[in-house]
Image: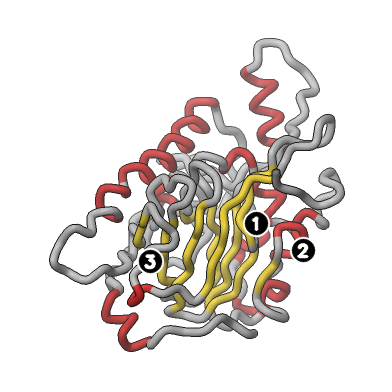
Amino acid sequence: MSHESHTDDSERRTDSTTTRGDTDGAAEQPHAMPDVGRRAVLQALGIGASVAVGSGVVAADHDDPHPPRIDSHYGYATPDANAVPERLAPDHTVELHVGDPVPQEHGPLFHFEPTGLAVDPGDIVQFSVTTPDHTITAYHPAHGYQRRVPVDVPPFSSPVVSAGGAWLYRFEESGLYDLFCAPHHILGMAMRVVVGDLAEEDVPGYEDTFEGTEGPPPLLAPFSKQFLEHELERFSGGNEDCEWVWLTPQEVLDTDALDPGAIQADDGRVSFDEVLADIERIHGGHSHE
């Protein structure tokens, strides 16, 4: 697995916080949630967005005498992706994009590029935002979702980042991380990061298991096409045979292209087009205006 150049690890580690905690306690359950009402869906979406927006106060407060650092919960946000402090120089860069819709086929394709990324423990990843407005948020019970990050990882999230801005995070713990954009989660904007050398026998069960829980509190899995169509029909007041034309996060995360082994192969990057090639209802890759 090859990676981009690394900053001095000893210097970088002095910048990061070391707080670890599992905030969800007994909230996680191994069984699937049989049904989720509209209120639970909207509440979960609101939780993700509110956590992301609220975190901006902490992440953006750099007007103090202390050197810039990457917080374990809130990362480091900047309105100018080209003004990242030298001491926080990233090892990898991910861009957040929106692909053009294709009439009669699919809506806009909100995505991370690359969509799969392999990094070493301690690496810094810069998420550069090219279109408004996005977050980078961990699937975590504290955000209202099935845990899809290592157990000791806190419920981290960026604030809402506008076009031209960036957010940086240091991935300390080895393991599998599934991330999403809170405003566009329902439109399939998700990605996967593999930290360290993840052997096949060490891949966590959530890699290909999408299960919510009844709670309390209720936790949602990454949305599937079937789930969203069911919700549209259930609350639409008479519509039948609804078809969800956008991507869904479950479709993206469940592709062969984002298998941990595939992500770790070659240069440790899986493009969005490679992911789309595994989704039969999306044809011909994608383009930007």
- Tell me whether circle 3 and circle 1 mark residues in contact (CB < 8 Å): no
Badge 3 amino acid: Val
Q: What quarter of the picture does the N terminus occupy?
A: bottom right
Q: What quarter of the picture does the C terminus occupy?
A: top right
Q: Nearer the viewer, residue 73 or 10?
A: 10
User: Which residue appears farthest toward the top when viewing the image?
Assistant: 238
Which residue is at a point 71% across and 79% down the rendered structure image?
Answer: 265
Q: Choose the circle earlier in sequence order: 3 or 1.
A: 3
- Foreground: disc 3 or disc 2: 3
Instruction: Read off the residue under disc 3.
Output: 84
Which residue is at a point 34% across and 81% down the rendered structure image?
Answer: 12
The crowding category of the residue bearing disc 3, from other C-alpha atoms within 10 Å (few below 14, some 14 to 19, many at least 20), is many
In-image side of 281 versus 259 (left or right): right
Q: Which secondary structure lies at badge 1?
A: loop
Instruction: Read off the residue under disc 2.
Output: 256
Is any atom of residue 216 visible in this view? no
Instruction: Read off the residue under disc 1.
Output: 209
Q: Choose the circle earlier in sequence order: 3 or 2.
A: 3
Q: Which secondary structure lies at badge 2?
A: helix
Q: Quadrant of residue 83?
A: bottom left
In-image side of 107 versus 139 (left or right): right
x and y percent of residue 160 in the render? 41, 45
Q: Which secondary structure lies at badge 3?
A: loop
